[in-house]
């Protein structure tokens, strides 16, 4: 959720760009579900494409400690969706 907040995108927009169901994203964010590896990869790849860098614990590479946004750029699918919404 913190990466989405930095990018100012909704769950629906992340779902559209990552091709992961919005309901799955909501469950992951509220701690209700541990994502499958392929789901996690789709979300991480999508967020990284938009400029998010995941910071990992140097002593435990499986533990994340935060994020940093290098240069935020919205996914083309999100930009297209927003353009369509404003032109309707």
Image (cartoon, rainbow, N blue to C red):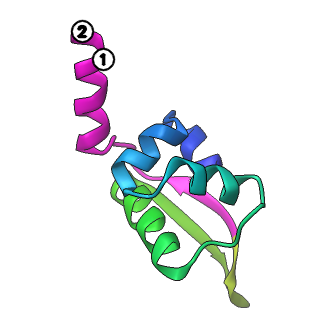
* 6 w.r.t. 60: above or below: above
Disc 2 element: loop
Number of dots carrying numbers? 2
Which residue occupies the foreground of this view, 84 or 3? 84
The answer to whether residue 80 is left or right of residue 46 is left
- Provide residue 72's location: percent of width, then percent of height: 39, 43
* 6 w.r.t. 61: above or below: above
Q: Which mark is residue 76?
A: none
Disc 1 element: helix
Residue at 21% x, 10% y: name it. Answer: 87
Residue at 64% x, 76% y: name it. Answer: 56
Which residue occupies the foreground of this view, 55 or 44? 44
The answer to whether residue 42 is left or right of residue 4 is left
- Provide residue 68's location: percent of width, then percent of height: 55, 55
- Provide residue 50's location: percent of width, then percent of height: 37, 51
**Counting other residues with Cα less than 10 Å from the Cα at mark 2, is it few (<14), some (14-19), or many (20 or more)?**
few
* 36 w.r.t. 25: above or below: below
- Residue 71 is covered by the magenta coloring: yes
- Provide residue 66's location: percent of width, then percent of height: 67, 62
Residue at 45% x, 58% y: name it. Answer: 20
Residue at 78% x, 60% y: name it. Answer: 31
The answer to whether residue 55 is left or right of residue 72 is right
Q: Which residues are magenta?
A: 65-88
Which residue occupies the foreground of this view, 84 or 59? 84
* Cα separation between marks 1 and 2: 5 Å
- Tell me whether the residue at label 1 lies in contact with that at label 2, contact meaning CB atoms closer than 8 angstroms: yes
Q: Which residue is mark 2?
A: 88
The C terminus, quarter of image: top left
**Counting other residues with Cα less than 10 Å from the Cα at mark 1, is it few (<14), some (14-19), or many (20 or more)?**
few
**Of all residues shown, which one is farthest toward the right?**
31
- Residue 70 is covered by the magenta coloring: yes
Q: Which residue is mark 1?
A: 85
């Amino acid at each position: 959720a913190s990466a989405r907040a930095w990018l100012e995108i909704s769950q629906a927009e992340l779902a559209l760009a990552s091709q992961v169901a919005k309901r799955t994203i909501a469950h992951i964010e509220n701690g209700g579900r541990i994502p499958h590896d392929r789901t996690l990869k789709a979300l991480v790849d999508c967020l990284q494409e938009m400029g998010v860098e995941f910071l990992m614990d140097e002593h435990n590479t499986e533990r994340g400690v935060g994020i940093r946004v290098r240069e935020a750029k919205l996914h083309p699918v999100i930009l297209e969706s927003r353009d369509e919404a404003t032109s309707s």
